[in-house]
Amino acid sequence: MTRHATQPIDGQKPGTSGLRKKTRVFMQPNYLENFVQSTFDAIGGVRGKTLVLGGDGRYFGREAASTILKMAAANGAARVIVGQGAWLSTPAASNLIRQRQADGGIILSASHNPGGPDEDFGVKYNSANGGPAPESITSAIHKRTQEISEYHVLDAADPDLDSLGETPLGEMTVEVVDPVSAYADLMETIFDFNALQDVFKAGFRMRMDSMCAITGPYAVEIFENRLGAPAGTVTHGTPLPDFGGMHPDPNPTWAHELMDEMMGENSPDFGAASDGDGDRNMILGAGTYVSPSDSLAVLAANAHLVPGYKDGLKGVARSMPTSAAADRVAEALGLDCYETPTGWKFFGNLMDAGRVSLCGEESFGTGSDHVREKDGLWAVLMWLNILAARKMSVAEIMADHFARYGRNYYSRHDYEALPTEQAEAMLDVLRARLGELKGTQVEGLTVESSDEFSYTDPVDGSIAEGQGFRILFEGGSRVVLRLSGTGTEGATLRVYLERYAPGPDGLDHDPQEALSPIIRATEALVGIRERTGREKPDVIT
Ligand code: VG1
Ligand code: CO
């Protein structure tokens, strides 16, 4: 008996990156099963298919993996390749799907959201290219969740997820693999590991904060074992079900231990952190913070120094709210540059079509066409390789970059857990006024244009509408506002602020100060403080 009757459950709509809910919501009877069966149904079933399965080690991941394996078996899948202990970082899962030519994969993670019984869990389906399912598939999944009447689970004992190798589960093969090795091997094909070993031999000091999340074992293997960095280079290197109570989001607010160390005296030369599922990165030098938008631009400008990109990049893409710093590099290098909606799923077609090889988001996400997800440790290795090739510090590289291209001062202000109706009403008012903002003068700035971003995919022509509000000011400054699609509580308003300084003067201001006219203008135009009653943002990056 594998068939179980069920009923549709409301709210199973994938967001920016899969379905994310409170863990206890996922643990309710039928909740996970309904969503997974709907996913299988939406992709035309899994009969005879090979899937990849793994997650970031958070609470409920192992139980969910067991259930999904039994469901895959009952649905006729041929093979599921699963990371040992149900562990796989998001980029490692993407790599395995591609390398093993699997039909797709399921990633169990809520990424940068905290984990634990009272925190968050998530399920995301990735397609055969290794990337997050496009909107056509995520909407088909959602539609299926609204009409589902049964799901299939094999009546069997929980499979052994700890012993490497193959075991049968009904007619299906469960193949448990080392989560790290294939990914670490891939990194060796892209970067100059000999040069990096020499850097560490010469005494270069690095701190990698894995934030008790999935990159720990990957980072220890790559930096300490393969590159010879001293033991202890990786901190918080053991993945824990609740991430040790930390918020595994690599930004100055949540990775404050690393920030303190890097901004303090006698700090290491280089610091980095990654998120829950290992696809985000934060880059720091001694006394220097690199904003993610600037990091993307620096990687674009220097990629040719890295063996994997020695022939240059095919093109560059960034999400719309990401600063235009990368655009300036693309222009100088004569590269095509694309602007997509928020979320990695929008980069997949561009990479598959060979139009871009480097992509990035302001939310600490950078990656390339080596996989189809953003990749935290890859970004750290890019920086290391560039530092080794240029023999400069992070601060020197940033100063040189700004001197050459000018600086896009940038910051994101997040207002978390707002009452949903309040946040939506505020943006509805803005939407209604968009047409009349042009020419408005506020805080010494003049509105040049304003719109709601909509994207037509140049490869398949699909259209994504309502992807964020843009208010552009004369002179190249702008503010973007959108609601988060990854939260699990109320609405999170993201306000993205940007101002361009061409240089040579005025390149070393504090971003919050440099952006203060735009912050004030935004308040005057949108009235965030007034409408929400919040004095200041919860998180500033
Ligand atoms: C956020 C980021 C977005 C990122 C997404 C998934 O989405 O803004 O850039 O792609 O998280 O990242 P939102 O809708 O909350 O703004 V991850 O590392 O959480 O998979
Ligand atoms: Co993530």
Image (cartoon, grey):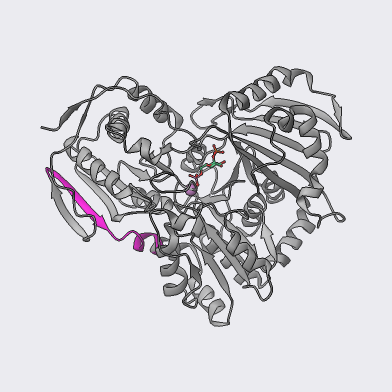
Q: Quadrant of residue 156?
A: top left
The number of discs equals 0
Q: Is residue 157 above or below residue 264?
A: above
- Residue 170 rendering spot, x and y as whole percentages: 12, 43
Instruction: State the quadrant of the N terminus.
Output: top left
Q: Is residue 181 magenta?
A: yes
- Tell me if residue 59 comes above or below residue 37 in the rendering: below
Q: Residue at x 58, y 63 (%)?
A: 257
Res. 476 visible in picture: no
In the rendered view, does 132 fall on the left or right side of 362?
left
Q: Is residue 539 left or right of residue 61?
A: right
Residue 95 visible (yes or no): yes
Q: Is residue 414 left or right of residue 227?
A: right
Q: Which range of residues does the magenta coloring cover?
A: 170-184
Could you say which is closer to the camera, residue 85 or residue 164? 85
Instruction: Looking at this view, name the residue that lies furthest to the bottom.
Output: 202
Locate residue 173, reporting x and y percent. 17, 48
Residue in the image at 31% along x and 47% along y: 53
Residue 35 position (above or below residue 333): above
x and y, in percent, of residue 349 in the image: 48, 37
